[in-house]
Image (tube, rainbow, N blue to C red):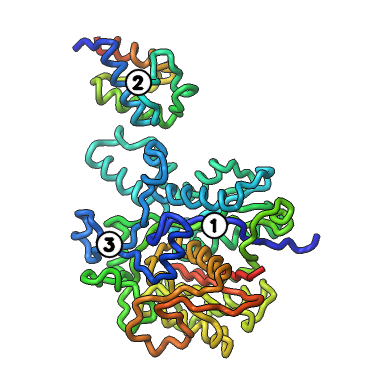
């Protein structure tokens, strides 16, 4: 069997910048921050009073009865998947050749905590019978699989903030290995709640710039002080190339490789040498059959933490060598905040749009570029990318030392 | 306290509308919870708990399987209350 190539034929998203891909993408190019002060009373009880909530509430995009049976993460998954499936032309196909791989870093954590409150305050009889299907981390994938009647397999890789990218890589494997012809893939997160935020704050992982929320997520800035929690999700429809051609689908680009590695260093801190990141990048290029010369853009993990951004940048410089000089690096978390398990997914959506429009999105909020950052960061305004064949990378890392690099190529 | 059948039906209509999103106007005594009103086994648990709270009656688990139609539920609650 000749190698099966995989292309992207549909995109969907709901993000802090917009309720769909088009709105999110134009806000991203315009350099808009999606970060806002939280209005809930509990926000004042924790050290961080802001986050990046989705721009459009699910209640504006779904039926009320659907909402009450679904965790917020599942709502995001369905909203983004419906857009992506429509965008792919709602392919008529054998559902035994359709798969779903949608990740979440934390799963239905707000359901878990809300139902625990009900258990303590009102007793077990009033705990919702929907609790378990809502809190299980595979719930977003399962609900999308059910709606689309996908029967080739429904999966949920979990690797903290690398989960979304890992899901897309798993989907790539499913098609390459001939388990499926089409896979709906991505990641979601809905963890804006006092408890997980208090936990992240206790790790000193979150920015505490309460007096200036829209300027708090500032990857590569000298005065960055942590990440900003975001929510939402992104979905890509991956499809075997000949399958897409046969049905006359619109093809955005090709996904040509993935690289995976693990640090074996620390449960939460990045390896300062970035050896794991370098290995993942090297494996990804080898899998893609490309070299560092082919790469013109990278959507970085860059979460705005003091240690993480520099460790990543050093690893990129080491892995890309002199070719890093022609790689336009964008840190879109400066606008979206950090969607944890949704991050690699929305950033992959952005890469596909970047290749389509040949425009790398900006990184905002860099007042003073950290001199330790030796990659070419796209600041403040989008940057035009070259014509001809171009390729771009997404890298995502998760607590636990998980590293994922995905490679997309123009077609 | 005695409950009137009409009052219980009105209450069940409100509960099913809340749980399953079916307009109260289309809910009648002869409607089947599963087939007509899209109340699956999990949502039925919600309906039962809400009805118990609202009407002050106990609906045992073994009785729930016999509540096939809205009328079954209404009559069970009326009998249990009286």
Marked residue chain, label 2: B
**Front position among marks 1 and 2:** 1
Marked residue chain, label 1: A
Q: Residue furthest right?
A: A1
Residue that carries the numbered disc 1 in the rendered image: A11
Query: Which numbered circle lies on residue A198?
Result: 3
* Residue A68 screen position, x and y as percent: 37, 39
Q: Nearer the viewer, residue A110 or A219?
A: A219
Q: CA distance from mark 1 to mark 2?
A: 48 Å
Q: Nearer the viewer, residue A57 or A258?
A: A57
* Residue A147 screen position, x and y as percent: 54, 41
Contact flag, marks 1 and 2 (Cβ < 8 Å):
no
Mark 2: which secondary structure? Answer: loop
Question: In the visual, does A1 lie left or right of A298?
Answer: right
Marked residue chain, label 3: A
Residue that carries the numbered disc 2 in the rendered image: B60
């Amino acid at each position: 069997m000749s190698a099966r190539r995989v292309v992207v034929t549909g995109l969907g998203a709901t993000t802090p910048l917009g309720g769909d891909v088009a709105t999110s993408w134009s806000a991203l190019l315009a350099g808009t921050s999606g970060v806002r002060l939280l209005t809930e009373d509990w926000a004042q009880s924790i050290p961080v009073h802001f986050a990046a909530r989705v721009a459009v509430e699910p209640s504006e995009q779904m039926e009320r009865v659907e909402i009450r049976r679904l965790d917020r993460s599942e709502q995001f998954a369905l909203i983004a998947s419906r857009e992506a499936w429509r965008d792919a032309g709602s392919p008529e196909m054998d559902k035994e050749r359709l798969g779903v791989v949608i990740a979440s870093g934390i799963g239905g954590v707000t359901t878990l905590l809300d139902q625990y409150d009900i258990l303590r305050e009102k007793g077990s009889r009033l705990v919702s019978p929907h609790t378990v299907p809502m809190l299980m981390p595979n719930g977003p994938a399962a609900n999308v699989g059910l709606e689309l009647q996908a029967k080739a397999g429904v999966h949920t890789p979990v690797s903290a903030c690398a989960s979304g990218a890992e899901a897309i890589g798993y989907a790539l494997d499913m098609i390459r290995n001939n388990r499926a012809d089409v896979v709906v893939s991505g990641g979601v997160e809905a963890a804006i709640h006092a408890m997980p935020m208090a936990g992240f704050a206790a790790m000193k992982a979150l920015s505490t710039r309460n007096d200036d929320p829209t300027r708090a997520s500032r990857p590569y800035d000298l005065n960055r002080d942590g990440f900003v929690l975001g929510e939402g999700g992104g979905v890509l429809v991956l499809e075997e190339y000949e399958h897409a051609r046969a049905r006359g689908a619109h093809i955005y680009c090709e996904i040509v490789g993935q690289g995976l590695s693990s640090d074996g260093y620390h449960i939460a801190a990045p390896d300062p040498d970035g050896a794991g990141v370098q290995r993942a990048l090297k494996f990804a290029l080898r899998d893609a059959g490309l070299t560092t010369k082919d790469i013109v853009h990278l959507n970085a993990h860059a979460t705005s933490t003091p240690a993480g951004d520099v460790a990543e940048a050093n690893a990129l410089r080491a892995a890309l060598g002199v070719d890093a000089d022609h790689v336009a690096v964008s840190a879109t978390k400066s606008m979206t905040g950090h969607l944890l398990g949704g991050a690699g997914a929305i950033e992959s959506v952005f890469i596909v749009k970047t290749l389509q429009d040949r425009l790398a999105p900006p990184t905002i909020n860099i007042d003073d570029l950290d001199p330790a950052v030796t990659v070419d960061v796209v600041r403040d305004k989008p940057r035009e990318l070259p014509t001809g064949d171009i390729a771009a990378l997404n890298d995502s890392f998760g607590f636990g030392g998980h590293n994922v690099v995905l490679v997309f190529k123009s077609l | 306290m005695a409950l009137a059948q009409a009052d219980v039906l009105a209450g069940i209509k409100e509960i099913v509308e809340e749980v399953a999103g079916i307009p109260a106007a289309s809910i009648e005594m002869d409607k089947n919870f599963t087939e007509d009103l899209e109340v699956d086994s999990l949502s039925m648990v919600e309906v039962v708990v809400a009805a118990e709270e609202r009407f002050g009656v106990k609906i045992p688990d073994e009785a729930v399987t016999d509540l096939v139609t809205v009328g079954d539920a209404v009559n069970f609650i009326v009998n249990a209350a009286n």
